[in-house]
Amino acid sequence: MKFLDQAKVYIRSGNGGAGCVSFRREKNVAFGGPNGGDGGKGGDIWAVADKDLNTLIDYRFKQHFKAGTGIHGMGRDRHGAGGEDIELRVPVGTQIVDAENDDVLVDLTEPGQRALLAQGGNGGWGNARFKSSTNQAPRRANPGEEGEERWIWLRLKLLADAGLVGLPNAGKSTFLSTVTAATPKTADYPFTTLHPHLGVVDLGPVERFVLADLPGLIEGASEGAGLGHRFLGHVERCAAVLHLVDASSDDPADAYRVIRNELLTYGEGIENKPEIVVLTKCDIIDEDTMNTARDAVEAECGQTPLLISSATQLGLKPVLFSVFNHVKARRAKEDAVREAKLLKEAIRRGEAEEEAKGWSP
C-alpha cells in the first residue's frame, strides 16, 4: 500500500430543503387551513479517527465530498427527510487544516474521535408554521439554508514515541529493523527510505514504545533539496529525537551540524525536544577513528554520543533504554494532566448535582 500522509479535499455540506405552501382540500372537511411541511436538514460532513487506518491513500483519487440535500416539505404536514451525512475516516493523528488560512480546525489524536467539519443547512419552514390568529391562510414558506463549503488539508502526523533522524545512509532503517520487527528497505545507496516506517520496540512486559524511521535529510532540505523536510511533521508528537550519525563518514561533526540546522529551520518545537546522539557503524572503523569522531561530535552537540553497531548489535540496549526514559517521563506527565482533568470534571459534576438538589432543612 502506498503511504500518503497529506491530501487536499473539497467538502460541502448539504443544503436544507425548502418549506412547502399547501392547504387542506379534503372532501367533506368543513374547515381547511395551511398544511405545508418543513424541509429537511442538509447532511453534515464529519471527520472520524479510525484506528484501523494508517495512511490517507483513500483520498488520493477522490477529493470531492458533498453531503446530501434535505428533501423539500410537502402538503398534508409532511416534513422532508434530512440529507445523508458523510464521514471522512482518517488515521489517528490526522490534523484537519483550513486550506485558505492554514488554521488547524481539529487534531484527531484519539481513536473514535469525531469532529464536525461542515454543518448542513437548516430546512425551511412550511406555511403551517406561519399560521396565527390574524393570518390563518399564510402563503409563505422559507427556502432551505445553504450548506458550508471549503477546501481542507488532511495532514497525518504519526503518533510515535521517538523518531529517527539523520543523513541518508546513516543507518536508520537498519537500526529500526534490528530493534523492532519492522522490515524497511535497506540498500547501499541514498534515499532508500521514501516514507516513514513504524516499529514497536519491546524492552519488557510493560516497557514498549513506538519508533519512527523518517526519510533522510540533506543540506538544504528546508528549501526542497532531496525529499524536503515535510516528513519532520511526524516527529512533532515524539517524546525524543534519536539523531543517528555515521561514524565512518568523512566529517561526522559536520553531518550532525547539517541535520541540526534543518531541525532548527523546520521549527515547530522539534529543536527543543530531548535529543539522543548516536554514532552508528562503529564496527567498520578502528578505535582511533571512532574516538576522533566521538570527540568531534561531542564538541559540536555538547553531549557524549552513544556508540552502536546495528550489524553486530553493539550498544543497542543503552540507546533504547535512554529513549524509553524520555518516553516514560512524557507518559507520566500526560497521565498527570489526564487525572487532573478528570478530577476537575468530577468536582464540577458534584457541584452541579448539589446545586440541582437545592437547600433543604
Image (cartoon, rainbow, N blue to C red):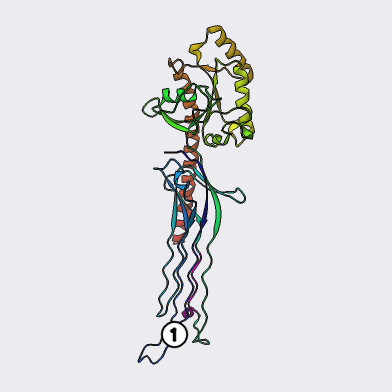
For the point 64% across and 28% down, the residue is 261
- Residue 228: name its quadrant: top right
Residue 126 part of the magenta-drawn span: yes
- Residue 111: name its quadrant: top left
For the point 46% across and 74% down, the residue is 38
Residue type (three-letter) at the residue carrying disc 1 = Phe
Q: Which contiguous range is marked in magenta?
A: 121-129
Can you give x and y, in whole percent of width and height, for residue 101 in the image? Answer: 62, 50
In the rendered image, the vertical position of residue 80 relative to residue 29, given as above or below: above
Residue in the foreground of this view, choosing between 266 and 133: 266
Instruction: Please give left or right for residue 299 compared with residue 163 in the image.
Output: right
Which residue is label 1 attached to?
23
* Quarter of the image that includes the N terminus: top left
Is the stretch drawn in magenta largely helix, strand or loop?
loop
Can you give x and y, in whole percent of width and height, for residue 207 in the image? Answer: 41, 28
In the rendered image, the vertical position of residue 281 relative to residue 21, given as above or below: above
Instruction: Please give left or right for residue 72 compared with residue 269 in the image.
Output: left
